Image (cartoon, rainbow, N blue to C red):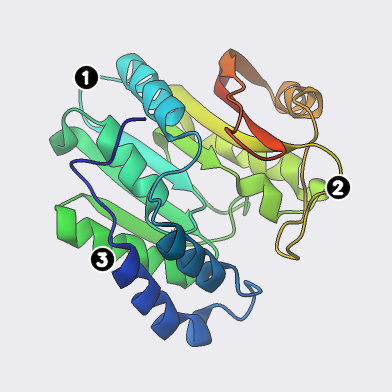
Amino acid sequence: METTARFPEDLAANLRLVEALAPAHCSGCMGYHLARARRRLKAGSPDALDRTETIQLLRTCLGQASHGAVDIVIAGVGDTNLLATCAEAMPDLAKVRFTVLDRCRTPLVLCEAFARRHGLNVETSQVEVGAPDAAFPADIILVHSLLRFLPRSAHRAVMLALRRWLKPEGMILFSHRLMAGDVMTESCYLAEYESAGPILNLFQEVGLQVVSSLEPVEQSGPRHRFLALLKQG
């Protein structure tokens, strides 16, 4: 697996910052950000399970983007992991503008600190993804595991919003884990999918076309992931 050589995360610093921020900002997060920071530091693993595939697909998206500045929107973050992954995928960060979105302020502060440490051009916005008045024009949108934290009834509106944000030649990199059976153990996870079929139906409903897809399998455990590159249909 490719490692985060250029943009390492400081998991210990992340935990300290979350411990300070959570009492003020995480009342609606059901302890998710604090539990995630503790779990990642204990495991000593800075990488998402599908990080290698995500980097490869991001570079594919980049090849389709304009030759000028590239606007990348990360729609929902748990901490600095997705921002580090996106930065690692970019060969020329001088041309990249990141916008990081989340409904909780805590992970946004983590990303702001990460951006300062690594000299990244990052704006953050505390927003409900899918809000009708939101507008974040993007060449690339990364939506990684976001739908897990939203009820099924909200998924269509969220994907419609992401489609609306795309520039004419823009692409969405979508990643969602597929769970076998009822294995949700945390109350913050509101929706899971057992197979890719319902997700593909969702894409079709909102006018998104699948350019390519992957289903990498976790090395151990009951889950694997569904990743897709999407464009306006």
Q: Position of residue 42 (x, y in %)?
A: 44, 64
Kindly identify which residue carries mark 2: 182
Closest to the observer, 223 or 136:
223
Which residue is outermost to the right? 182
Q: Position of residue 111 (x, y in %)?
A: 33, 60
Closest to the observer, 118 or 126:
118
Closest to the observer, 142 or 47:
47
Q: Position of residue 135 (x, y in %)?
A: 48, 47
User: Which image quarter: residue 137?
Assistant: top left
Q: Amino acid at mark 1?
A: His
Kindly identify which residue carries mark 1: 67
Viewer-nearest of labels 3 and 1?
3
Q: In the displayed structure, does residue 143 sit left or right of residue 86?
A: right
| Secondary structure beneath label 3 | helix
Viewer-nearest of labels 2 and 1?
2
Q: Is residue 23 above or below residue 154?
A: below
Label 1: how many Cα within 10 Å (few below 14, some 14–19, many 20+): few
Which residue is outermost to the front? 220
Residue 231 in view in this figure: yes
- Location of the N terminus (image quadrant): top left
